[in-house]
Image (cartoon, rainbow, N blue to C red):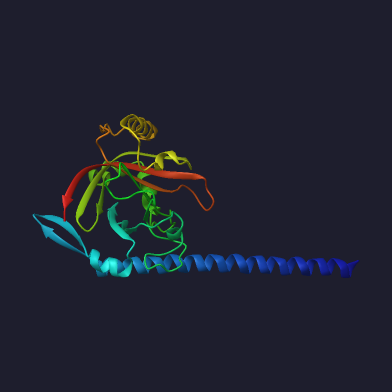
Amino acid sequence: MKKRRLKIKNILLILFIVVFLFSTTKIVLFLLDLQNNKNEIKELIKDVTDIEIEEDKEVLNIDFDKLSSINSDIVGWIHFNQDKINNPIVHTSDNSYYLNHSFEKKSNQAGTIFMDYRNTSFDDKNVVLFGHSMLDDTMFGSLQDLFKKDFFDKKENHYIDIYNKERKFTYEIFSYYVIEKEEYYITPSFSNDNDYKKFIDTIVKRSYKNFNIEISTNDYILTLSTCSGTGGTSKRKVVHAKRIMDESN
């Protein structure tokens, strides 16, 4: 009997060690991915962006030719939340590849910010961008800041800048909320103005804050989507903003 108990204990101990080593390895690999992606983006920012001062304003310049030479899937650059979100935007034929690949197309759990594959350009009625909610605030991790009490007290926190090779778009946030995963808020286009108006009314009503911003069917919307919570969560943090400026670069 004692031998049998000892054998069971040894088997359980071995199982515990295997599970522990497996879990530890996964955590270490995840942290390495995080650091590698952070370093890659940091180097990318240094290589392809510079800031000029024009009329007492900071102007972000981006070398899209260099970005294209690294990854031809590049379609834009997003700048928001006081440099916390300062990333390239890619676009491909699905919504899965860039969930686990870096901008340089290396396997990486932190992924890359990407445009919904159904979007065709930034002139779609609803341009949808996805990014992981990373614990170190990279990708769309810092969208959690919007849910802090004083975030919108600063006027500059209301605006999101998007750049592509030819133009710079500025968007003003008019809605943000958490919702169960669904397809509705990521609808990229609409068959008629009535459908678009219903969509606008729905996402405005969902907002945790009333921004008192008028949105019409003539407006263009930017939607940011990320997970709300840890791995496997079905909830999404969502941010909607309307285009208020369209400038040539």
Q: Position of residue 82 (x, y in %)?
A: 27, 54
Does residue 71 appear in the picture of this structure? Answer: yes
**Number of marks drawn:** 0
The spot of residue 123 in percent (x, y) is 26, 46
Residue at the front extreme, as displayed:
191
Which residue is outermost to the right? 1
In the rendered image, residue 30, in percent from the top left (x then y), is placed at 50, 65
> In the rendered image, which quarter is residue 77 located in?
bottom left
User: Going by the image, does 45 lie left or right of 60?
Assistant: right
Which residue lies at the image location 22% right of the left edge and 49% below the top edge? 169
Residue at image location 64% in from the left, 66% down from the top? 20
Corner quadrant of residue 26: bottom right
Front-most of residues 115 and 37: 115
- Image position of 218 (left or right of 113): left
Q: Position of residue 188 (x, y in %)?
A: 36, 43
- Res 114 → quadrant: bottom left
The residue drawn where x is 42% and y is 44% is 237
Which residue sits at x=24%, y=35%?
218
Determine whether 210 is above or below 105 in the image.
Answer: above
- Position of the C terminus, as image quadrant, is bottom left
Who is closer to the viewer here, 57 or 126? 126
Using the image as rendered, state which of residue 50 and residue 217 is in the foreground.
217
Q: Quadrant of the N terminus?
A: bottom right
Q: Is residue 100 left or right of residue 5?
A: left
Whether residue 148 can be seen here = no
